[in-house]
Image (cartoon, rainbow, N blue to C red):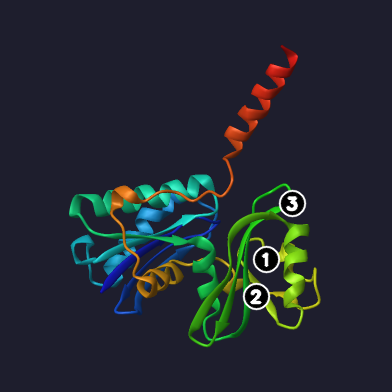
Amino acid sequence: MTILALECAAKAASAAVLRDGVCVSECFSAGGRTHSETLLPLTEAALRAAAADCHDIDVFAVTAGPGSFTGVRIGLAAVKGMALPLNKPCAAVSSLEAAAYNLLGQDCLVLPVMDARCRQVYTALFRVCGNHIERLLPDSAVTIDDLTETLRQYANETIVCVGDGAGLMSGLLPNITAAPEHLRLPRAFGAALCAYRAERFISAAELLPVYLRVPQAERALAINNAQLTMNN
């Protein structure tokens, strides 16, 4: 099975080709350019490095969220554009789970953390034992204080943070630390491997974003409407 995976739900963008569970190519960019500029060139480069094109891909995978609302939409649109004309199956992957795959080979709890602003984070919790990964907590949007309280039950285990919000949680409890910089950001390889192991495939038309929170524009509109109602 050959999987092409795209990841641009966070600050970095990447594309990877996985063949029978082995990564044969990956292109990654965290240079600050917008995902709309970088994602397709990265995808083309990853396919070229794997000596493949879209017709050779069996499954198109993408991180469907949580994360940047714009980034998630860009990734989904790119995958839909490639998979729909070819009627190929797709896989919607959690960006948090993809980040947790960065620590395969370790023996610890992995806490993916993405900054959701206003002292909130997108997070989940996974146990990694060598090449095995197990989900302990679902993807959620929570306050840093509430997450800290939840993690107290794991006080006897080492918790390693990944994601662009890793620094927000590191050190809040004695057993919480941040992964090295090069292992923090979600990667397309993790998304591809997650899709390969899960084997939960859907059609391109069924791909939907997973935001966990209402977009900021909608929250602002709701607040504005509520204030207008009160004034009237």
In the image, is 7 to the left or to the right of 200? right
Mark 2 residue crowding within 10 angstroms, few (<14) / some (14–19) / many (20+): many
Q: Which mark is residue 71?
A: none
Percent x, y for residue 214?
Answer: 58, 41
Residue 176's image quarter? Answer: bottom right
- Kindly check if marks 3 and 2 are in contact, taking CB atoms under 8 A apart as contact: no
| Viewer-closest of 11 and 103 | 103
Choose the circle earlier in sequence order: 3 or 2: 3
Name the element at disc 1: helix
Residue 140's image quarter? Answer: bottom right
Choose the circle earlier in sequence order: 1 or 3: 3
Which residue is disc 3 drawn over?
119
Which residue is located at x 35 percent, y 65 percent? 200
Work out whether 152 lies above or below 85. below
Name the element at disc 3: loop
Q: Amino acid at mark 2?
A: Ala
Q: Amino acid at mark 1?
A: Ala
Which residue is disc 2 drawn over?
179
Which residue is located at x 23 percent, y 61 percent? 54
Q: Amino acid at mark 3?
A: Arg
- Kindly check if marks 2 and 1 are in contact, taking CB atoms under 8 A apart as contact: yes
* Distance from Cα at disc 3 to Cα at disc 2: 21 Å
